[in-house]
Amino acid sequence: MVIGGQWGDEGKGKFVSDLAPYVDVFVRSQGGPNSGHTVMVNGRKYAFHQVPSGAAFRKPSIMTAGMVINPLLLYDEMQQVDDPSVVLIDARTAVITRAHRALDGYGEINGTAIGTTRQGMGPAYESKANRRELITIGDMLDKQRLAEKIANYALAHAVELLQVAEMEQIAVAKGELDPKNALVQSNLSREQYCNLLTDELFAAGQKLAPHIVDDTSIILQQAVNSAKRILVEGAQGVLLDRDVGTVPYVTSSRTTAGATLADAGLSRYADQKNGYWGVIKAYTTRVGGGPFPTELKNGTGELLRQKGFEFGTTTGRARRTGWFDAVATAYAIRMGEISSGYLTKIDVLSAVKEPMICVAYEIDGARTAEFPADARVLGRAIPILEPAGRIERINRHDIVMAGRKKGFDALPENARAYVERVETLLRDLSGAKDFEISAISVGPWKGQTVVKQAFV
Ligand code: GDP
Ligand code: IMO
Ligand code: MG
């Protein structure tokens, strides 16, 4: 089990690439095209959104019913791997239509602006939760059923869709939107619009048909029975969890290890003590809105953004950057049930002259090391910072070579001290006494990693 230990984009794809040789079957069980996981291996760079990162390694890569999927994007996404036939998707998985994407954007303008990825995540999970509006991947194979479900959705959301059409018309008139990219075509009647959605989804269904499986849990059970090693790849991060993240500035699914594993139907088999991995960045980033106590809106923040290439894999938006926040990350370890950490991007942090670690907050004049449950309170938190000492330049090649023999000791002294300080703080603040940082990533490519505690 691999999850994100902060606000997403910690480097989950990189960690999956390191684990790939030890894994037989890969699983994604929640989230959808809002994710962007980068895998860099053998001179190639892959960007996975919906497909499990393991597909780059030609191994069975399964998408279970907990996800929400944009089928119009899925086929092309699969084509980046050498053997797309490894990708299988559960027929019960919910479909994201253009209409869901339209309503996601509409909510950003007419509701609380969360800064979503505008991929239609929230509206698609709403359709799933209310059941009446759910369109599944399996439905795409039956044109009449699909048409009925789309008509039902368009009728239920007729007023909002009309409003989106008006907004889009204005944007087109101003030259801000190419009419081809309009999510609701204002020149079409509702019936014509429904036909358009039905046709495009039916066509996508025909292309995806060989990948659609009625019940992916049978395949997973067979894998368990034949002692295959299964990796569940989480998406987003614990602080973006719908229930226990910085609500309402969160995603629409659950992102903790427990929830993600349950969505895959595999909790029974998980090795919690050694196998609930949290990927943690050596500094902090966040995309979209919401409180971010250690945010750096200065040259240092910009340096981290440039050196760490902190631009969204999904939306291209510049990621907000800031110091490592031990209070927030410790909370994520506790709520996310993380047992081991994989610390990324220490090489990027080494570009900063005077790195800091946030060890506590000051809120309304009082010091606390508890992460406030209420995002409005978190918004008032002033970070209490501790100087961490400048990290030596990371010579990736030498460190990785030396790391094969010396492990953690291959890292320069101050880098080791940084890792140890982070580990101690996270242990103390989370209450997870046996939490360990077991590996440190020093670059984006598979294998640019130093192992502290053998992880398999
Ligand atoms: P994910 O969503 O958690 O999979 O993370 P993303 O792929 O969205 O963002 C992480 C970015 O950092 C990607 O561009 C990775 O290639 C890159 N990356 C991961 N680990 C490291 C590292 O240790 N050092 C550097 N320099 N880049 C890294
Ligand atoms: P990975 O898997 C970073 C953020 C969005 C927004 C909020 C809600 O690559 O780590 P949504 O579109 O999900 O309704 O947006 O959640 N968000 C992510 N931020 N990484 C992600 O995924 C994210 N997925 C969603 O920026 O703030
Ligand atoms: Mg990402």
Image (tube, helix red, strand yellow):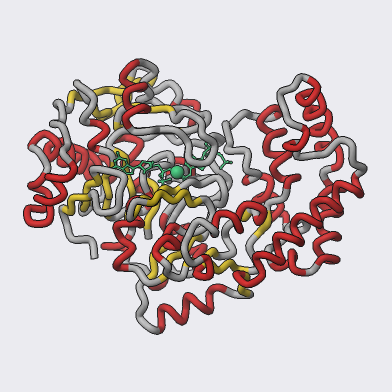
The residue drawn where x is 61% and y is 58% is 75
Residue 172, by quadrant, is top right
* Residue 368 visible in rendering: no
Taking 136 as reference, is 217 left or right?
A: left
How many labels were placed on the picture? 0
The residue drawn where x is 29% and y is 53% is 446
User: Where is residue 78 drawn, in percent x and y?
Assistant: 54, 59
Residue 170 or residue 261, whichever sits in front: 170
Which image quarter holds the C terminus? bottom left
User: Where is residue 341 drawn, in percent x and y?
Assistant: 27, 50
The residue drawn where x is 90% and y is 48% is 192
Taking 401 as reference, is 127 left or right?
A: right
210, above or below 418, in the image: below
The residue drawn where x is 44% and y is 51% is 46
Which image quarter holds the N terminus? bottom left
User: Where is residue 433 drawn, in percent x and y?
Assistant: 21, 51
40, above or below 79, in the image: above
Residue 57 or residue 155, whichever sits in front: 57
Residue 346 or residue 263, whichever sits in front: 346
Check the image and name the residue furthest to the bottom. Answer: 226
* Residue 332 visible in rendering: yes
Quadrant of ligand 3 in image: top left
Residue 56, by quadrant, is bottom left
User: Where is residue 152 drawn, in percent x and y?
Assistant: 85, 54
